[in-house]
Amino acid sequence: MEQQEIIKLDGLKKYFTISKGLIKTKKTYAKAVDDISFTINKGEIVGLVGESGSGKTTLARVLLNLTPKTGGSMTINGKDPSRLHGKELKKLRSEVAVVFQDPASNLNPRQTVEASIMRPMIIHGVTKAEAKKKAGEVLDMVKMDRRYLNSYPHQLSGGQLQRIAIARALALNPKIMILDEPTSALDISVQAQILNLLLDLQEEMGLTYLVITHDLNVIKYISDKIAVMYLGRLVEFGPTEEIANNARHPYTKGLLDAAPVLDPKLRDRKKELLKGDPGSLIKIGEGCRFCDRCAYATDECRSTMPENRMVTSDHMVACFHPLDME
């Protein structure tokens, strides 16, 4: 059966202009998102990983049309958000929900849980009576008692607040959810509960997820595919199992080796930990952005940007010398 493309990025770019000097004649650019291309199909869970400053959240903001793109193209359900206005943009935004890292900072401390859940529905034209009814229904979906509808954020735990944030995201019956570090502020046991809840909701509602995180263990548990970013570039993309067991880019291998190993039987294997800092998005050379930290870098890597290369039918890597390919 042919897969339906829900999100498609083709050469997407977001550059931030930096002016220098008193008269600001010299301009440089921070290339936060630079030539990103990948596709997310209906019902897929794609994990977007990378170190802090790699451009993950900027990519999400561009996708949500909160930050204008500099170049390239993007479509959600076949429509480019940057070209939509008025009712069309409002409709598309109702189809895309967002769950942020810190739910406490995204809930109004002066509003009850019920009011917070109802607000996006009322903004999109739902009557108060319908919004009130739906608020109770989505709280049931995230497995919370309806008595919490009258609670305030300061009365709830971190896990409860994240469930409320997910309930609010579900209120408009979205088709896509973008989750930015959805479990990083939670205890380990609560993380597992939230991840299982997200998997249950995805299966029940046929949702498509883009999960942004730095936690490789979370991504390996929840996602179907992994996209790896480094300093604004996409360096590897493919099925989760394939990348987890056979990473071809040295940076991906370094991220995997840096993650805690949960299986005691695998803790003795050799690790190649990343050295140095990610560097700056402003002072970028012509070559591969990872070359200064890469043990396999050659003169070609330092002078030329590697193009995307398919090592299997669905596994892409941007590297001149992919691991295990020599």
Image (cartoon, grey):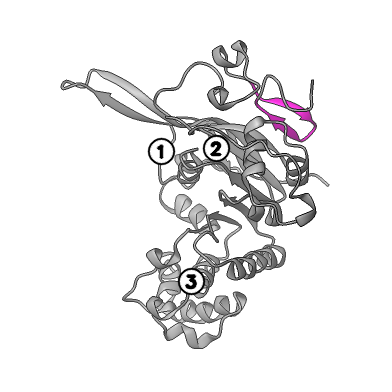
Among the two numbered marks 3 and 2 on one chain, the one whose residue lies closer to the N terminus:
2
Q: Residue at x 62, y 19 (%)?
A: 297
Q: Quadrant of residue 40?
A: top right
Disc 3 marks a residue whose amino acid type is Gly
**Which of the numbered marks, if any, corresponds to residue 33?**
none
Question: Residue 101 appears at what percent x and percent y?
Answer: 48, 58
Among the two numbered marks 1 and 3 on one chain, the one whose residue lies closer to the N terminus:
1
In the foreground, 136 or 164: 164
Please state if 234 lies on the left or on the right of 199 as rendered.
left
Q: Residues in magenta? A: 307-318
Up the image or down, 144 lies above or below 195; here it is below
In the foreground, 285 or 63: 285
Q: Residue at x 52, y 59 (%)?
A: 184
Q: Secondary structure at mark 2?
A: strand
Q: Residue at x 48, y 33 (%)?
A: 277
| Residue at the farthest front position | 268
Among the two numbered marks 1 and 2 on one chain, the one whose residue lies closer to the N terminus:
1
* Residue 43 visible in the picture: no
**Which of the numbered marks, if any, corresponds to residue 158?**
3
Q: Residue at x 63, y 14 (%)?
A: 298
Q: Quadrant of residue 106?
A: bottom left
Up the image or down, 127 lies above or below 105; here it is below
Disc 2 marks a residue whose amino acid type is Met
The residue tagged 1 is: 68
Q: How many neighbours does mark 1 have within 10 angstroms: few (below 14), some (14-19), or many (20 or more)?
A: some
| Residue at the farthest left position | 22
Residues under labels 1 and 3: Cα distance? Answer: 32 Å
Question: Residue 229 appears at what percent x and percent y?
Answer: 57, 37
Up the image or down, 137 lies above or below 23; here it is below
**Which of the numbered marks, if any, corresponds to residue 74?**
2
Up the image or down, 63 lies above or below 116; here it is above
